[in-house]
């Protein structure tokens, strides 16, 4: 048994480790990629030591998107041609839905478009949100509201804070329903007055 272990350790020292083999292979691949890049640059008439331009990142402004508030959803529409063209390519668009944020990243030939909405006016249910591209027209982001509240704006008023919506329609109705009825002689109308006013 001792001889087998000794023989095994001798074998292990003679054969390069998997990590070493991978490192060598990666170095070869990097050299090949560099040679291919230099060849491509020379084909374009550029010097082999020239630096390729860095990808350009364009942040989309709120003024470049449209949105619609529906009872259970908020729909965001992006119609910028570069964004739509890039989104049509398979795998070119990544959308990250968070409880109070949405970040869409679309890459196209050295340009990356980013739409970062954080914080949103109110919370959403990320697992029920989706994105869709209508060919040649727009990208649509569909947000499922966590609460069926009307959104008066897409984002909270100030970064780091969230707009707190008022009472829901159901809550407002319950206040009116429990308020006593008052009839005044000067007015033929019947009015409901909330208890906190009395």
Image: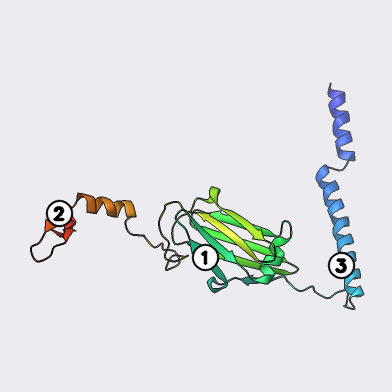
Structural crowding at the residue carrying mark 2, measured as other residues with C-alpha within 10 Å and reported as few (<14), some (14–19) or many (≥20): few
Label 1 element class: strand
Label 3 element class: helix
- How far apart are the alpha carbons under marks 3 and 2? 82 Å
**Where's residue 152, x and y in %?**
42, 65
The quarter of the rendered structure image containing the C terminus is bottom left
Query: Which residue has dot 2 on it?
Result: 181
Q: For residue 121, which numbered disc appears in the image? A: none
Label 2 element class: strand
Which residue occupies the foreground of this view, 137 or 156?
Answer: 137
**Where's residue 91, x and y in %?**
72, 56
Q: Are marks 3 and 2 in contact (CB under 8 Å)?
A: no
Query: Which residue has dot 1 on it?
Result: 67
Structural crowding at the residue carrying mark 1, measured as other residues with C-alpha within 10 Å and reported as few (<14), some (14–19) or many (≥20): some
Query: Which residue has dot 3 on it?
Result: 37
- How far apart are the alpha carbons under marks 1 and 3? 43 Å
Q: Nearer the viewer, mark 1 or mark 2?
A: 2
Which residue occupies the foreground of this view, 54 or 75?
Answer: 75
- How far apart are the alpha carbons under marks 1 and 2? 41 Å
Side of 141 where 147 appears, left or right: left
| Quadrant housing residue 114 | bottom right
Side of 158 where 17 appears, left or right: right
Q: Are marks 1 and 2 in contact (CB under 8 Å)?
A: no
First of labels 1, 3 by sequence position: 3
Side of 118 where 20 appears, left or right: right
**Where's residue 23, x and y in %?**
83, 51
Give me the residue at 79% from left, 73% from top: 52
Side of 27 where 100 appears, left or right: left
First of labels 3, 2 by sequence position: 3
Q: Nearer the viewer, mark 3 or mark 2?
A: 2
Give me the residue at 86% from left, 67% from top: 37
Q: Nearer the viewer, mark 1 or mark 3?
A: 1
């Amino acid at each position: 048994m001792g001889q087998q272990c000794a023989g095994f350790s001798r074998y292990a020292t003679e054969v390069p480790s998997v990590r070493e083999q991978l490192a060598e292979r990666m170095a070869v691949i990097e050299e090949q990629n560099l040679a291919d890049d230099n060849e491509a640059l020379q084909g374009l008439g550029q010097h082999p030591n020239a630096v390729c331009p860095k990808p350009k990142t364009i942040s989309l402004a709120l003024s470049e998107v449209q949105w619609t508030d529906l009872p259970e959803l908020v729909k965001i529409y992006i119609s910028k041609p570069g964004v739509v063209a890039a989104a049509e390519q398979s795998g070119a668009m990544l959308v990250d839905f968070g409880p109070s944020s949405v970040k869409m990243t679309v890459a196209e030939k050295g340009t990356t478009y980013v739409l970062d909405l954080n914080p949103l006016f109110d919370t959403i249910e990320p697992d029920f949100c989706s994105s869709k591209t209508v060919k040649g027209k727009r990208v649509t982001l569909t947000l499922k509201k966590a609460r069926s509240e009307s959104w008066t704006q897409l984002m909270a008023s100030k970064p780091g804070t969230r707009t707190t919506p008022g009472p829901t329609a159901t809550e407002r109705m319950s206040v009116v329903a429990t308020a006593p009825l008052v009839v005044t002689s000067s007015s033929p109308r019947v009015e409901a007055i909330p208890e906190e006013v009395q």
